[in-house]
Amino acid sequence: MRRGAGIGLLALGIILVLAGTAVAVAMGPDDRLTTGPHDVRTDGRAVVTKPAVLARYGPQVSVLVEVPDEKPVFVGLGHTVDVEDYVSSTARVEVTRYRVPWSLERRDATGEPQLRAAPTALDWWLAQSSGIGGAQLRFTLPDDAVSLAVLAVGDFDLRGLRVTASYEVPGAFGVGVGTAATGLGVVLLALVALKWVPGVRRTAPAVDAVGFVDDEWDVPWPETDPADADTWDDFLSEDSTPPATKAGSGAAGPRAGGGRWSRWRRRKGGVTRPKAAADKQKVAR
């Protein structure tokens, strides 16, 4: 069970690493995927896209078209209904499908060699750009069916057309790097689960027991007078009544002569010796 889970985590981590790395490398730090320039073979005056080509909503797209010999060229974005009606009678190339980074499916439509009107004279374009030898158009894909049209201006054609496209997705580079980092973490977790990489274990520091005992006994115990030590005889022989007061004094005073008082005097530096110790000395003599 544990081995199966580890293998599953390892596979998931590898997929995340590969996907995140691919996104980060493709988009780059500027969050832009650029492809081209690519040659588009045509000798006509119009190249248009079908709605499915620009069906994605949100990304910002930049299209650069170039033609040789300093020929004028026009590139515009419009609603599919307007664009198809405008080029319906003109011979054209229709791009029916596009795949990133650059894979086109196209078909050639027959018609008249000329456009019905100059593209720069129309006012229904959502975005447009024109130039001599090339033109660049940058736009955000709307949530509508739109088509992109590359058109020749005047009596020129689009022979030698080259197209460079780029897609900008804000934050894509950071998402790719984060996905790859997450995948690395999952791979490491899987390796630990499979016991291919030892986990981190905390070990208790070694204790020098001999040295500890030696250090314990290196400090000498303070020498004391055996007569100052309390014994059971001391406690058993203590008189619980307070000592008598001096002659001429009044009532009995505080504990000034009892056993506890004698012990207290010894500890404070007095010379009173316990009764049991004095008896022992008499017997010894």
Image (cartoon, rainbow, N blue to C red):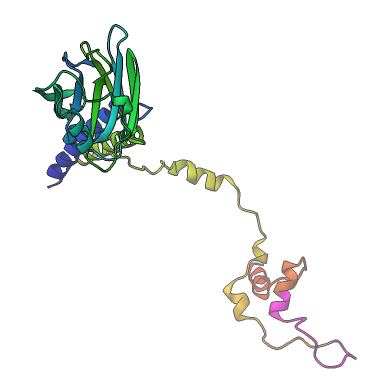
| Residue at the spot 20% in from the left edge and 18% down from the top edge | 45
Residue 195 in the image, given as x and y percentages of width and height: 21, 38
Residue 25 in view, yes or no: no
Residue 150 in the image, given as x and y percentages of width and height: 25, 23
Residue 49 in the image, given as x and y percentages of width and height: 19, 29
Quarter assignment of residue 38: top left
| Residue at the spot 72% in from the left edge and 81% down from the top edge | 258
Q: Outermost residue toward the top?
A: 69
Residue 92 in the image, given as x and y percentages of width and height: 15, 22
Q: Is residue 240 magenta?
A: no
| Residue at the spot 38% in from the left edge and 27% down from the top edge | 30
* In-image side of 122 versus 233 (left or right): left
Front in this rendered view, residue 216 or 264: 216
Q: Which quadrant of the figure contains the C terminus?
A: bottom right
Residue 142 in view, yes or no: yes
| Residue at the spot 77% in from the left edge and 65% down from the top edge | 269
Residue range of the region highlighted in magenta in the rendering: 246-262
Front in this rendered view, residue 259 or 216: 216
* In-image side of 229 versus 11 (left or right): right
Q: Main secondary structure of the magenta part?
A: loop
* In-image side of 253 versus 228 (left or right): right
Q: Outermost residue toward the right?
A: 248
Q: In the picture shown, does residue 274 fall above or below 209?
A: below
